[in-house]
Amino acid sequence: MPRMIDLIRASAVPATLMHSAAKGALSVPPEEMIEILVYLADHKLFGEQARLTLASWDPGISLAAAADPQSPKEVLGYLVAPKNLRIALIPSLLENPSVAELALVALAESASREVADLLLASVRVGTSESILQALSANPNLSGIQSATVSDKLAALHPALRAPDGQEEILLDTMISEPGPPEEVLDEGLMAYLTEHADEIAAEVDKPFQPIGGFYEELVPSTEEPLAETAPEQPATTAPTPHKAAVAKKPHTGLDQERGSALQKIARLDIKGRIQLAMKGTKEERSLLIRDGTKIVALAVLDSPKISDGEVEKIAGQKNVLEAVLRAIPMKRRFIKHYGIVRSLVANPRTPLDVSLGLMKNILVHDLKNLSGNKEISETVRKLALKMFKQKMDSSKKSTD
């Protein structure tokens, strides 16, 4: 026998029963009743009654639903939405792994100070850069709360506090170390080589050709500096013209590391570059993602060592292959990271169909920014403006 929620979804019950359902007066298990109410909350005829019932629903049943990872995603999404929020449910919702991070980001953006205190007390929030960044932009926070958010963000990246301009070096080390076990890297590499054997064979003789015109500027000059004075010449012989000494720009440690990595990559064949993309350092991955050979660039995204932060930077780059930007949202791990989604949509090089497909995930303040970004497609700008107005109107109606 089908469940009552299935019958209601199929419009297979009379209006009188629907009215009873909106009042929460059906003889069904509590977990099914709350699912029915959430479904009816958007109903044209019974939505208002269902929302009123949910607002006063038994706290114990609501709390059980908020804490249960098996609760339907529609129920959890309804309970965590800012317009439906009940303070008593927030701690359970925050720690429920089935509650989407994007939903918590939306909550953090507009949270009251009372809700912000609960967010700041959450273990999950304290380890999520996306949620903390959204919270840091919340205008409702007190000075103490803002300082707490800053401290938590800094705790995620201790290198941000490092002295003497060494932040980037230390942050790179923190992100890339420790990496996955060597056997994991080897298994990933072998799987990739096997899966793409035909493509690799077709491109086997293709050298490293980076996109973006940065090759020469990153390879430190190997030319020896000329002596400051020319060697003595016989008096009867005219001085032999020689090259003027070229003033050399001093290379920082990062420049030298980058130049060394680039020289190393330039000597490798396609299989060597794929191996380096899968097993190399963050610096090497940042170069190989710009390889003009698609199969090498895509290997970077398959590396077990790559971090979400690296992918977020890649998603915003204009000097990568279109295939790279298409591949990022196809990986579930990356598409769950809001910063990556936002960077892809704001990147004018991202294919239009990819950008439009991701727009539904963009938050209100970012929609506003996108609508005024003249670098991106006019189609994306217009859709961003339309969605921004719709969300603002919806927000106003819910507060009336």
Image: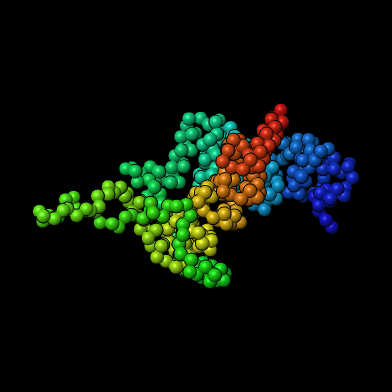
- Left or right of 208? Residue 372 is right
Q: Going 54% across and 50% down the picture, which residue do you hit?
A: 315
- Left or right of 240? Residue 372 is right
Task: Establish if 68 lies above or below 202.
Answer: above
Q: Going 69% across and 35% down the picture, which residue do you hit?
A: 390
For this orientation, the residue located farthest to the left is 235
The number of discs equals: 0
Colour convention of the picture = rainbow
Closest to the observer, 303 or 372: 372
Residue 107: percent from left, percent from top: 60, 39
- Left or right of 74? Residue 288 is left
Residue 390 in sight in this render = yes
Closest to the observer, 331 or 370: 370
Residue 51: percent from left, percent from top: 75, 37
For this orientation, the residue located farthest to the top is 400
Q: Going 57% across and 57% down the picture, which residue do you hit?
A: 323
**Rendered image quadrant of residue 397:** top right
Residue 206: percent from left, percent from top: 48, 66
Q: Going 44% across and 56% down the picture, which residue do you hit?
A: 287
Q: Quadrant of the C terminus?
A: top right
Closest to the observer, 362 or 90: 362
Task: Establish if 352 lies above or below 50.
Answer: below
Q: Quadrant of the N terminus?
A: bottom right
Residue 88 in sight in this render = no
Residue 389: percent from left, percent from top: 67, 34
Task: Establish if 20 lies above or below 291.
Answer: above
